[in-house]
Amino acid sequence: ESKYRIYISPKLGAMKVVDIKTATIQRFFDELELNQKVRVKNTLNPLMKYAVEKRIINTNPIPEGLLTSVARGMKLRRAENRENLVHQTFDREVMDGTVIQALNHEDKKIRYDAIPLMFMRYQGNRKGEALAYRWSDIDFKNNTVKVVNQVQGVSKRISGKDTYSDLYSPKTEHSVRVIPMAKEVRQVLENWEWSPPADATEFIYKSRNNSVMTGNNYSEKHLKPLLKKVNAPNVSAQD
């Protein structure tokens, strides 16, 4: 009732249900923040379904595409919030020790799996940003790295495998940025010991099939074993 009074009534309260059209709903949602869209959806959609059930209106004016878009937006928001937790989990001293140990580990795979962690520590990236770096984002001449994408993993089974992920521009225009390259990052990239990239569009850290890796896949199958190998505190696979 309070959500109806606060969000819905000021815009739609004076209208008859039969006069509320899809275009009206779309304009209404366009004015709302994501959290507000969720509250309105959870309140208004059941009301419209009830109106259809009672034959007050023939169809629900809230389009399925809009409902899906709001749900997906919240899923991506939650994923981004989980990724931010990695910075809260490690204090700087522990993070430094973990990255240094991993980058100098005798196991070459552990050294490779430390690459995203290296970007998170020394470039201040979120996990999704660290996984999305391509070689074209690295400018050795000007000693900078460019943050233009982030990975948002979506749990979805394709051909029996959970391998689906998407690249998105960072959430705000301020998140798209060019930043100085840390000396620790430059040293690793200049002395690259793994397969050389075929071209500049290749991801610096990539999965076995040369594609971008989801955050959950990295945390569960790569970061956790790395932390165990270097005796570092555990980080949730959802960080």
Image (cartoon, helix red, strand yellow):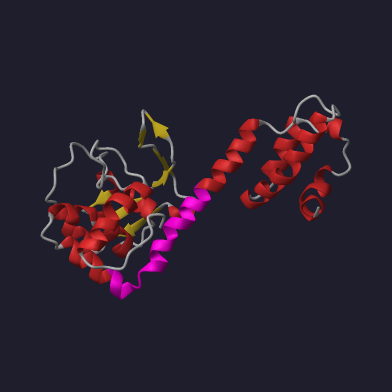
* Depicted 21 relative to depicted 239: above or below: above
Judge from the rendering whether residue 109 lies leftward or rightward of residue 37; answer left or right: left
Judge from the rendering whether residue 32 lies leftward or rightward of residue 221; answer left or right: right
Count of picture labels? 0
The x, y position of residue 137, in whole percent, is 29, 48
Residue sitting at x 13%, y 47%: 194
**In this view of the protein, which residue sits in the foreground, 155 or 97?**
155
The x, y position of residue 13, in whole percent, is 86, 44
Q: Residue at the bottom extreme?
A: 93
Which quadrant does the C terminus fall into? bottom left
Residue segment shown in magenta: 76-95
Say if the magenta span includes residue 85: yes
Q: Tell me which corner region of the image, top left, top right, bottom left or bottom right, holds residue 212.
A: top left
Residue sitting at x 21%, y 37%: 199
Residue sitting at x 36%, y 58%: 125
The answer to whether residue 185 is visible is yes
